[in-house]
Amino acid sequence: MSGDAQNNAVHISGGTVNRNIYGGFSLVSGSETGSATGNTVTLSGTPVLGAATALYGGFVGTNSGATPAPSTDAFTGNTLNLKTSGLSVAGTGTLGQPHRHGNQPHQDQ
């Protein structure tokens, strides 16, 4: 059995986010395989991100807390689009090269 979260899009343009942001999230059992690939996270406008908020293109975890199978892929084709400035995040993971639109700098902490 496997679980996949592929080709999802998350767009955040306002409001307050105090938790992690995932483009795709797959939860598998035990040694099953899964993927979270081809997902896109887009930040625009004026969202407020909490001090502990991190951005992930994809995430694969297990419902038992065990390590997912080695063939699990939570990176391939995941994208971060930045269409805003002045944001700080606790971290990023499983994302390809960020795409910045215009002359808008970003800051990772």
Image (cartoon, rainbow, N blue to C red):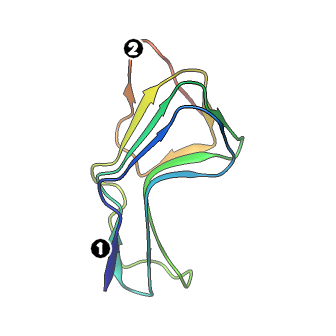
What residue is at 30 percent from the left and 59 percent from the top? 6
Secondary structure under the numbered disc 2 in the rendered image: loop
Q: Which amino acid does the dot numbered 2 rest on?
A: Gly
Q: 30 above or below 55?
A: below
What residue is at 50 percent from the left and 19 percent from the top? 105
Please state, as top left, top right, bottom left or bottom right, where the N terminus lies in the image: bottom left
Among the 4 quarters of the image, the one containing residue 97: top left
Please state, as top left, top right, bottom left or bottom right, where the C terminus lies in the image: top right
Q: Nearer the viewer, mark 1 or mark 2?
A: 2
Q: 72 above or below 41?
A: below
Q: CA distance from mark 1 to mark 2?
A: 37 Å
Where residue 20 appears, as percent x and y from the top left, is 59, 52
Q: Which mark is residue 102?
A: 2
The residue under label 1 is 71
Where residue 44 appears, as percent x and y from the top left, is 49, 28
Question: In this rendering, does residue 9 appear at all?
Answer: yes
Secondary structure under the numbered disc 1 in the rendered image: loop
Residue 13 lies left or right of residue 90; in this view the side is left
What residue is at 57 percent from the left and 44 percent from the top? 91
Where residue 70 appears, as percent x and y from the top left, is 34, 75
Residue 73 lies left or right of residue 29; in this view the side is left
Among the 4 quarters of the image, the one containing residue 37: bottom left
Residue 14 lies left or right of residue 51; in this view the side is left
In the current view of this chain or complex, which residue is farthest to the right? 51
Among the 4 quarters of the image, the one containing residue 88: top right
